[in-house]
């Protein structure tokens, strides 16, 4: 049975799975639906490969949850609670995920998330909703109200991530509420 670590942000969960190994290699069960809070069922799997120095995010969804697992490399994950009414609204947290350390990360809807590739990186992640461009929202990676420490100098960013709005500029209709609206 894995270990579950709580974080500074409500409903975010770090999963530390059991690792089994011998002279042949190792085996890790990386995901089980029953591990995740809020009764979320993952319906789509994705693979993201990034070069060292890349920053992705911050992104957030009003309805979609994510489960991340770094298979190779190191990522500094930045999380920021945008959920109006949440006890942890406005909290920013960083977590390092390392392919050699076997950790999963559950990110609920309304928590902005992104990562800096501290090395070349292979991230496998699951989502509980199919891609919906209307639910693919962003927050400025360098917003001083977020205060993220990405650990990267001169980052590589997409055009989209360079143009995301600051927290104070996000329209009320695009701000997540807590508890989640369905």
Image (cartoon, grey):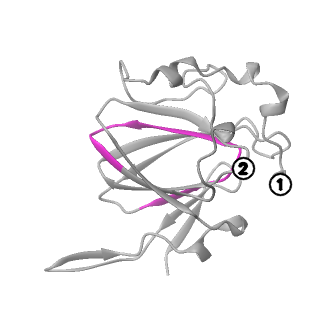
Where are the magenta residues, as a range? 103-122
Q: Report if the CB atoms under discs 1 and 2 are less than 8 Å apart.
A: yes
**Closer to us: 77 or 93:** 77
Q: Position of residue 94 (x, y in %)?
A: 52, 41
Callout 2 crowding tier (Cα within 10 Å): few <14, some 14–19, many ≥20:
some
Q: Position of residue 114 (x, y in %)?
A: 51, 38
Q: Is 174 situated left or right of 34 in this image? A: right
Q: Position of residue 117 (x, y in %)?
A: 36, 37
Q: Write down the quadrant of residue 174 in the picture.
A: top right
Callout 1 crowding tier (Cα within 10 Å): few <14, some 14–19, many ≥20:
few
**Closer to us: 97 or 52:** 52
Residue 81 in the magenta stretch? The answer is no
Q: Is 107 situated left or right of 29 in this image? A: right
Label of residue 182 in the image: 1
Residue appearing at x 83%, y 54% in the figure: 182
Q: Is residue 108 above or below residue 153?
A: below
What secondary structure is marked by label 1? loop
Q: Specify the principal SS of the magenta part.
A: strand
Q: Along the polypeptide, which appears first: circle 1 or circle 2?
A: 2
Mark 2, residue position:
63
Q: Write down the quadrant of residue 110 in the picture.
A: top right
Q: Is residue 159 above or below residue 182?
A: above
Q: Position of residue 154 (x, y in %)?
A: 36, 18
Q: Is residue 13 above or below residue 61?
A: below
């Amino acid at each position: 049975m894995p270990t579950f670590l709580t974080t500074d942000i409500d409903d975010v969960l770090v999963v530390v799975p059991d690792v089994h190994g011998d002279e042949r290699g190792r085996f890790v069960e990386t995901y089980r639906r029953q591990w995740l809070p809020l009764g979320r069922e993952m319906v789509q799997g994705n693979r993201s490969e990034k070069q060292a120095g890349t920053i992705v995010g911050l992104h957030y969804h009003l309805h979609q949850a994510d489960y991340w697992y770094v298979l190779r490399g190191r990522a500094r994950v930045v999380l920021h609670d945008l959920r109006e009414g949440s006890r942890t609204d406005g909290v920013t947290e960083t977590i390092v995920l390392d392919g050699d350390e076997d950790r999963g990360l559950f990110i609920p809807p309304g928590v902005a998330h992104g990562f800096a590739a501290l090395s070349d990186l292979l991230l496998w992640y699951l989502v509980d909703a199919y891609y919906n461009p209307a639910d693919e929202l962003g927050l400025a990676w360098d917003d001083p109200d977020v205060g993220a420490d990405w650990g990267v100098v001169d980052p590589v960013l997409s055009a989209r991530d360079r143009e995301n709005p600051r927290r104070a500029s996000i329209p009320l209709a695009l701000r997540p509420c807590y508890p989640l609206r369905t």
